[in-house]
Amino acid sequence: MREYHCTTCDFHITGPANEVADEIEAHEEQHHADAAAVSGIEVTPEILRAVASWLPCESTADEDAVDALRRHARHLEREQSDEKRIDELAQMFLRAEKEIAIYGLVDWANQSENQRDAYRAGIRAVLAKLDEDPR
């Protein structure tokens, strides 16, 4: 059983650790996103790791706080890596489309942001389906 109480916003959740872990992580991530938006500072994995390394030396921070920072750093890295991979695959998809295009030159740089988003959404859907496949 895990109990979590956020002192920042008074959010509270209790339940089996494996069932509430995602909700807790999403809640903490939202606080990080809100803080970054207000401060204008981009929170990077490197910054999170630096703070995680500094905390035990300068305060009486518990290991949960340090672990949470390191987990969030890994999460951001995965997210950045996934977005880069999605963008690369979307461009590959566009190049493949270019080979059969009838209406002139198709180039990633000339695509509107809406078109790019559509390609990325398609790639995300394919990757999500591949993640479901147990093979």
Image: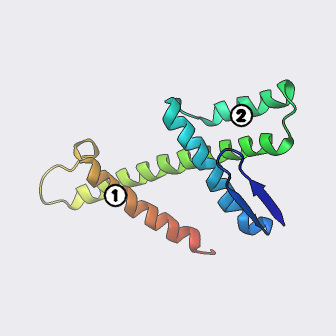
Q: Residue at x 38, y 56 (%)?
A: 120
- In the image, is 40 to the left or to the right of 65? left
Residue 40 visible to an observer of this rendering: yes
Q: Which of these two is toward me, 72 or 100?
A: 72
Colour setup of the view = rainbow
Could you tell me how far apart the alpha carbons at marks 2 and 1 are, in whole angstroms? 33 Å
| Residue in the image at 80% along x and 30% along y | 55
Amino acid carrying label 1: it is Tyr
Q: Which residue lies most toward the top here?
A: 58
| Residue farthest toward the left in the current orientation of the protein | 103
Q: Is residue 119 left or right of residue 34?
A: left
Dot 2: what SS?
A: helix
Question: Is residue 67 shown above or below 119?
Answer: above
- The relative height of residue 133 versus residue 10 in the rendered view (above or below) is below
Point out which mark residue 119 bears: 1
Residue 35 x, y percent position in the rendering? 56, 37
Few, some or many residues within 10 Å of mark 1 (<14, 14–19, 20+) = many
Which residue lies most toward the bottom here? 134
Secondary structure at numbered mark 1:
helix
Q: Determine which residue is flagged by label 2.
A: 49
Residue 67 placement (x, y as % from top left): 79, 44
| Visible residue check, residue 93 | no
Of residue 75 and residue 124, the one placed in the foreground of this image is 75
